[in-house]
Structure formats: C-alpha cells, structure tokens
Image (cartoon, coloured by chain):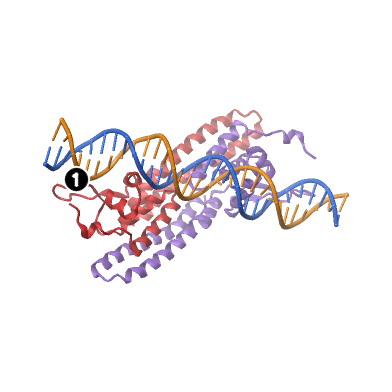
Chain colours: A purple, B red, C blue, D orange
DNA sequence: AGGATAGTTCAATATTTTTTGAACAAAGAT
DNA sequence: ATCTTTGTTCAAAAAATATTGAACTATCCT
C-alpha cells in the first residue's frame, strides 16, 4: 500500500524550510497561527497536492492541528481540494490557491469585514449613549469624537474594494 | 498638591468604557496588545490631556504597562505630548492624534514596512537557493513560485501609498 | 455486520505574549 | 547633598493563544 520512495521523505529539505519560514512570518503579521503558515507554505512549494497525513508527517504537527489548519485555510479560500484523483482514492488531497486576489479576498471576507461590522455596531450604540449626556458642551465634544470614529469606519469600508482591485493583478 | 475634585474620579464611566472597548477590539485586529487600546481609547475620549499617572489610576493598569504603552503609541505617532502646560509642571501630559492619516501612516511605517522588507530579503535568499536545484523541471517549478512571491511583495509595496492616500481624508 | 482508514472535536497541555511590580534612573525642589 | 516626584526597565507572574492527542464519527471495503 505504501510507496516507499515517497513515504520515506520525512524532514523538510532546506529550501522547503526556507519557504515555510517565509509563510510563517507572513501569517504572523496577519495574526494567524504559525501552523497555518507551515501548512500553506508547504503546499505552496509542493509540486503535487498533499494529504492531511502528508502534512502531519512532513511538518511534524498533530493531526488535530493539520485538520483545524486546513479548515481555516479552506474557509479563507487559500487551499482547495485537489480535483479528481481518478478512481478509488479515498483520501483527499489539497493544493494551494496561488492567486493573490483570492487570498486577499478571503482574508478580507473572513477576518476584516466581520470586525468592521461589529465595530460599526458598537459605535452606533456609542452614539446613542452620547445623546444622554447632560452637559451640552461635553456632549458636543463627545459627538465630535464619535463622528470621527464613524468617518474612520466609512474610510475603512471604502478602502477594501480598492485594495482588492489593486491586488487582483 | 492633589485636586480632590479630579483625583477622586477613578472608575471609568459607562461611556468611557464603551469607547475603550471599541479601541481594545480595534487594536486586537491590528495585533497590538489590549493595553494599547485602553490607553489610546481613554485619551481619545478625554477632553483634556492625561498624564501617565492618570492612565494608571483610571484604567487600573500598572505603571510599567502605561509607560510601555505610551512609548509604543508615541512611536506609532498615535499620541503626542501635550504642549506647554505653562509654568512649573513637571509631569508630562498626553493627547491623542485623531487624524486617520497619521494613525495609518504610523502603523504602516512601524508595523508593515519592516515586515515587508524582511520578507523581501528572505525571498531574495530563496531565489538563490532555487538556482542550486539540479533537476531542471523542478527548478523551473520553484522559480515560478518564487517569482509569484516576488510579485506579491511588489503588489504589497504598491498598495501601501494608495492606502495612505485614500485614508488621508 | 465488522474492520480499517480518514478526518474531526475538544479538554488538557504547552507555548507565546502581555502585564505586573520592584528596583533603578533622572531631574526638580529644598 | 538629599528628598521627592516622575518615569523606565526587565525578570517573574499571569493571561491569552495555539497545539496536542485521545476519543469519537464517517465512510469505504470485505
């Protein structure tokens, strides 16, 4: 069942390690866990799709980590299941999405938008609280600040599509 | 020396708590520690500049946290020392920078650019490693991937100034 | 049905990051 | 010169986050 010629490859070679390290750094900037970077990095530099088990073996991470990592990467649209490995193959193989547009889109959709939304909600509530302040001068100051927050949110909303457009090339 | 009427204000009022909470969420998205959000948030909603000691008392954080937090916020250009509180005042007071342009600029300069730079360096080294691969077909595949990484970095570099421009309004 | 292989879930553990607090440094006041 | 107030530093403690691994579910194969 096992193909020794492939199964024996365990450790990452130096080049693979370099690539993984680039992505580990990359995802850290985005606030995602290291395992995400490792998984995506290895997929990115592999010529053929890898199974969950390949990732576990080669990266020496737990099955749990690999499973959760793949789930998140799928939700971000950063990996997809490799299409039709013909006949009776049960295991699923994964390949990376390598178009920046798609990666950025997924990140914005999954990680940025939700926070922007919940921020807007909080700020709306804040605006209401502001109204109840008795002292007029103070109230005007607060309104001014809340107004500014709302402006920031609007700018944020405007900038995302533009970001996507520029990075989709 | 102490002005009881002011010094007695300890707890944050509900509105202040709401604002602080918005900023705590906000900085979390950016990958900055909660204390940064608390400090900036309280400054943002305060009508007059606050001293390090005010922050410690009102936010119930340690002097160390306040000091380090203020240092980071200064480096980001997100707070500045309040100008000339006249005569013999030794303590320094801080006020927030409230222009989005400045905040975004500081964040990009301090948090994004350095990572972009070190990423580029790593990728340059990677390109060299790629050259040493014997098998031509494999080498060509790797070159293709590294090329793509370089493209991503270029896109990143191009997008930052545009971001700043759009948010500077 | 029973066995084997693939993959998921989640409580416990490990790691990383942040915060604290006490010692220290700087500088004005007496 | 010494005391006092203000602020900084950094090792240790606490909190937050990620990873593990074992129990579980699903599905295919005989």
Does A14 sit above or below residue B9? Answer: above
Is there any visible trace of residue A51 in the rendered image? no
Towards the viewer: A75 or B7 = B7
Name the residue located 57 percent from the left edge and 38 percent from the top edge: A20
Name the residue located 43 percent from the left edge and 65 percent from the top edge: A121
- Residue A163, given in percent of the width and then of the height, sits at 46, 53
- Residue B24, given in percent of the width and then of the height, sits at 40, 55
- Residue C26, given in percent of the width and then of the height, sits at 23, 35
Name the residue located 43 percent from the left edge and 50 percent from the top edge: B30
Q: Helix, strand or loop at disc 1?
A: loop
Q: Residues within 10 Å of mark 1 (few under 14, many from 20)?
A: few
Does A144 sit above or below residue A99? Answer: below
Specify the subunit that label 1 lies on.
B
Is there any visible trace of residue B61 in the rendered image? yes
Residue A49 left/right relative to A36? right
Towards the viewer: A16 or A124 = A124
Q: Dividing the picture into quarters, in which one does residue B127 lie?
A: top right
- In the rendered image, the quadrant that contains the C terminus of chain B is bottom left
Towards the viewer: A42 or D9 = D9
Residue B66 left/right relative to B159? left
- Residue A37, given in percent of the width and then of the height, sits at 56, 43
Name the residue located 36 percent from the left edge and 54 percent from the top edge: B38
Disc count in the image? 1
Q: Which residue is mark 1?
A: B90
């Amino acid at each position: 069942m096992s193909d020794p010629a492939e199964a024996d490859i365990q450790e990452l070679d130096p080049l693979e390690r370099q690539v993984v390290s680039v992505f580990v750094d990359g995802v850290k900037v985005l606030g995602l866990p290291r395992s995400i970077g490792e998984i995506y990095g290895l997929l990115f530099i592999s010529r053929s799709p890898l199974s969950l088990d390949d990732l576990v073996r080669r990266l020496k991470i737990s099955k749990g980590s690999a499973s959760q990592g793949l789930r998140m990467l799928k939700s971000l649209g950063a990996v997809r299941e490799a299409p039709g490995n013909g006949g009776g193959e049960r295991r699923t193989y994964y390949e990376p999405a390598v178009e920046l547009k798609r990666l950025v889109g997924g990140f914005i959709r999954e990680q940025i938008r939700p926070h922007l939304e919940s921020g807007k909600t909080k700020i709306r509530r804040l605006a209401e609280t502001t109204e109840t302040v008795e002292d007029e001068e103070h109230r005007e100051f607060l309104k001014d600040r809340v107004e500014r927050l709302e402006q920031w949110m609007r700018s944020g909303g405007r900038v995302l599509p533009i970001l996507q457009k520029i990075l989709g090339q």
